[in-house]
Amino acid sequence: MSGQQSASPPTARVVDVVEALVSAGADHPTGRWTLAEVVAATGMTRATAHAVLATLVERAWVERDDAKTYAVGPALRLLARDLAAPGTLDQLAHDAAAKVAAATGHTTVVVRCEDGAVVVGDVAAAPGRTSAIAVGSRVPYLPPFGPGFAAWADHDEQEAWVGHAERINPALAERLRRVLPAIRRRGHSLERFDPASASVFEALALLQDDALGDAVREVLGTVLARLTKVDFTPAELRGRHAVTAIAAPVFDAEGRVVRNLALQPRGTHAAAELTELGRTLVEAADTVTESSGGRRP
């Protein structure tokens, strides 16, 4: 926080809060701050800090979770991406998603896994189309969500992810242990569309973050885990199928998944077409991995 007298104190307070949260993202153990921590870092009164944060949350520059902690929000992340020099991970992923959307005619999103959630960081609609998916949309990193991360996770993380399914649906856990190796060999995940789970998908997709807290998301995710038949074994990937998403991983220099590129092929598609879409997506994700200095494990 600057010690100089500002020409516009209200503007300075906004900048102080943004700078504090950016600093928290880099230095704080959780990447999130409570209101009290923002007050301590900026020297504002509690009421002033709360008012500034509330406005920033409304504009999606800041996000607030159920625990009432604050972090940099999706709109500010997108702005940072647009201002970043070419070659940064998010810029490379954005460019790759846009190219895939243009080449395939299907919306392609960039997702990351953070704070126990799978979060949409960027959305590229096909040319001439719009997408209902909102940047910042999030679902819990629990089965059936996030197989494109779990398939390449280390043993402990993968077992923890599968273990949640085991507690609520042992049959799903058994299936996950069969399909995760298949996803890894194939190079991408395939999220199946099950009519029985359509209403739960719709609730997760349409309810805004301020109307759908993390606790409710977890309940809906648990319901969905009871209904969903996850991905495909090689023998099942024949004929025609309704698939909601195809996701391919982007890796960092340690071979860890840091992003997924996820394409959304609406409608029913032949297995050969799904395989070709998956190949296109994997090639794009591999290009991002290589260009950003990452490597496959």
Image: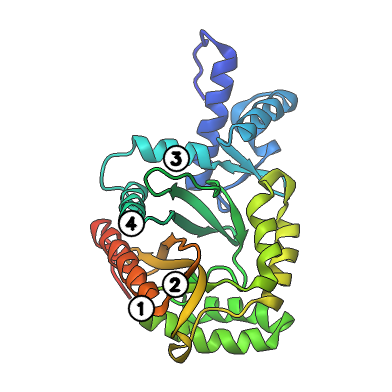
Which residue is at a point 71% across and 63% down the rendered structure image? 199
Q: Residue 175 sits in which quadrant?
A: bottom right
**Helix, strand, or loop for circle 3?**
helix
Q: Is label 4 or label 2 in front?
A: 2
Marks 1 and 2 sit apart, C-alpha to C-alpha, by 8 Å
Marks 4 and 2 sit apart, C-alpha to C-alpha, by 17 Å
| Disc marking residue 269 | 2
Marks 3 and 2 sit apart, C-alpha to C-alpha, by 32 Å
User: Looking at the figure, which quarter contains the C terminus?
Assistant: bottom left
The percent position of residue 45, horizontal first and vertical second, equals 71, 24
Q: Which residue is mark 4?
A: 100
Q: Would residue 178 be found to the left or right of residue 256 on screen?
A: right
**Helix, strand, or loop for circle 1?**
helix
Q: Classify mark 2: residues with Cα within 10 Å, few (<14), some (14-19) or many (20+).
A: some
The percent position of residue 59, horizontal first and vertical second, equals 59, 32
Residue 130 vertical placement versus 294 (above, below): above
Marks 4 and 3 sit apart, C-alpha to C-alpha, by 19 Å
Q: Please, what is the three-letter code of the amino acid marked with disc 2?
A: His
The percent position of residue 44, horizontal first and vertical second, equals 66, 24
| Disc marking residue 272 | 1
Q: Classify mark 1: residues with Cα within 10 Å, few (<14), some (14-19) or many (20+).
A: few
Q: Please, what is the three-letter code of the amino acid marked with disc 4?
A: Val
Marks 1 and 4 sit apart, C-alpha to C-alpha, by 18 Å
